[in-house]
């Protein structure tokens, strides 16, 4: 039996993890055995991201999508500068959600017109910085539009803006709902025409519309339905606008499997629908469609690696106490939106082809019962010094975690 097949069996309860090589019985991101990689990093815990896995995901997506469609990377999923630099060369644009992310995008050498800045709480100073940089400010209120207009007048620069629309519909079965009903995101679709009138009156450049219904969805039919509705809404609003635009952003929503029973998203019906919509956009709008993805491009390519400090037994249950935990990976601990805690795919990374024949619970060093990385999970037998890896950790890991909690050291990050 091959080492890769053995690794897939280990994740039988989860979606099989086939994104990393196995070398000498160890998971090997970038072809480097994890124990050797830990020596190279110099300490644990650490996050490691595999550039080949990122590139392969983008390539497979490009092959499925229409050639005319633009693919943007949402930096908030993973803003590590080296990851952003890598994806800047693979995608058509970058979407940022803060002034710091904007700086990372521009430092990556991306042309300003390929960067857009979204977020419901942009300050006037952040909008001024974005206008000065020449990037597109995705306005999410009438006030943000006025602040962009004022910044342009003060700086002698023609602002580039997009209007984010809060649609009346939502992306069904999405992990996080970003549109439909009362939301802090965007401008209600009924009020968009008056905002577009103000755009015309002010003379600023309208890059396009951004319509985003939700994220982390594993139902292809729900995504197809939302994309059709998004296109029809965008087309209706832009016909009322009556002028040219650079693009229509359909948002994202493509999910990845994290938990037992979940499978990789079936991209085929989504791609077929996008081919039809892209053809229509060429005729209806004379402008391309944009799909904006974050976790779908990077989640699978990341591991969070920590070291076992102690092995102990309590009331018949085995605990592996590690130097990593919720302060570094809040999502894997179950404290980032889960109602009922479920395990991410986890393995003893330096014993990846050993049988997972012992039920163990992996916890961190923090003085809280919430600090759990794997609960009663079949794993290979592990001892102090062994390395535990949490898979699907390339998105919303380090920067989505309370790293200052209990004042433990921050983990390292590497791209290999």
Image (tube, helix red, strand yellow):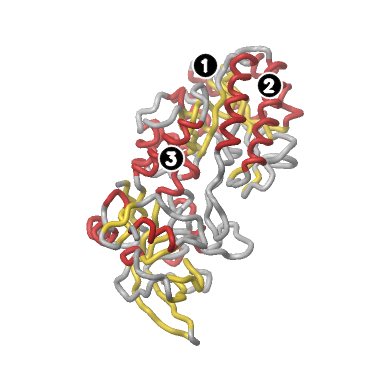
Regarding residue 150, the answer to whether it shows in the image is: no
Between the C-alphas of marks 2 and 3, the distance is 30 Å
Which residue is denoted by mark 2 in the rendering? 235
Q: Between tags 2 and 3, which lies in front?
A: 3
**Mark 3 element type:** helix
Which residue is denoted by mark 1 in the rendering? 158
Q: Is residue 305 left or right of residue 32?
A: right
Q: Between tags 2 and 1, which lies in front?
A: 2
294 up-or-down from 147: above or below: below
> In the image, what residue occupies the spot 48% across and 44% down?
77
> In the image, what residue occupies the spot 43% across and 57% down?
391
Query: Which quarter of the figure has residue 192?
Result: top right
Between the C-alphas of marks 2 and 1, the distance is 25 Å
Q: Between tags 1 and 3, which lies in front?
A: 3
For the N terminus, the quadrant is bottom left
Counting every numbered tag in the picture gives 3
**Mark 1 element type:** loop
Which residue is denoted by mark 3 in the rendering? 57
């Amino acid at each position: 039996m091959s080492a890769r097949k053995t690794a897939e069996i280990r994740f039988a309860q989860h979606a099989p993890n086939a994104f990393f090589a196995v070398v000498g019985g160890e998971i090997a991101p970038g072809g480097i055995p994890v124990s050797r990689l830990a020596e190279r990093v110099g300490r644990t815990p650490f996050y490691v991201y595999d550039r080949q896995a990122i590139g392969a995901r983008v390539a497979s997506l490009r092959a499925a999508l229409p050639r005319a469609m633009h693919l943007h990377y949402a930096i908030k999923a993973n803003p590590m500068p080296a990851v952003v630099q890598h994806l800047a060369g693979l995608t058509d644009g970058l979407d940022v959600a803060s002034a710091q992310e904007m700086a990372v995008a521009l430092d990556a050498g991306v042309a300003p017109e390929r960067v857009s800045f979204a977020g419901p709480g942009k300050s006037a100073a952040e909008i001024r910085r974005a206008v000065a940089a020449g990037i597109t400010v995705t306005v999410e209120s009438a006030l943000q539009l006025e602040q962009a207009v004022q910044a342009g007048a003060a700086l002698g620069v023609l602002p580039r803006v997009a209007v984010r629309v809060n649609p009346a519909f939502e992306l069904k079965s999405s992990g996080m709902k970003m549109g439909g009903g009362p939301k802090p995101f965007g401008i209600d679709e009924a009020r968009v025409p008056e905002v577009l009138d103000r755009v015309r009156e002010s003379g600023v450049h309208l890059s396009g519309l951004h319509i985003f219904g939700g994220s982390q969805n594993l139902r292809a039919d729900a995504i197809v339905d939302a994309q059709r509705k998004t296109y029809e809404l965008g087309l209706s609003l832009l016909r009322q606008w009556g002028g040219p635009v650079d693009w229509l952003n359909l948002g994202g929503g493509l999910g990845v499997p994290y938990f037992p029973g979940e499978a990789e998203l079936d991209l085929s019906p989504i791609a077929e629908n996008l081919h039809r919509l892209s053809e229509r956009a060429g005729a209806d709008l004379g402008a391309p469609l944009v799909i904006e993805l974050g976790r779908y491009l990077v989640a699978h390519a990341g591991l969070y690696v920590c070291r076992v400090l102690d092995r102990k037994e309590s009331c018949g249950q085995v605990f592996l106490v590690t130097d990593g935990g919720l302060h570094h990976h809040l999502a894997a601990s179950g404290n980032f939106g889960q109602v009922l805690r479920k395990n991410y795919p986890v393995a003893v990374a330096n014993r990846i082809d050993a049988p997972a024949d012992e039920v163990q619970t992996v916890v961190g060093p923090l003085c809280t019962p919430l600090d759990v990385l794997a609960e009663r999970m079949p794993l290979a037998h592990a001892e102090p010094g062994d390395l535990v890896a949490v898979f699907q950790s390339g998105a919303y890991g380090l920067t989505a975690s309370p790293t200052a909690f209990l004042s433990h050291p921050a983990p390292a990050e590497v791209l290999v």
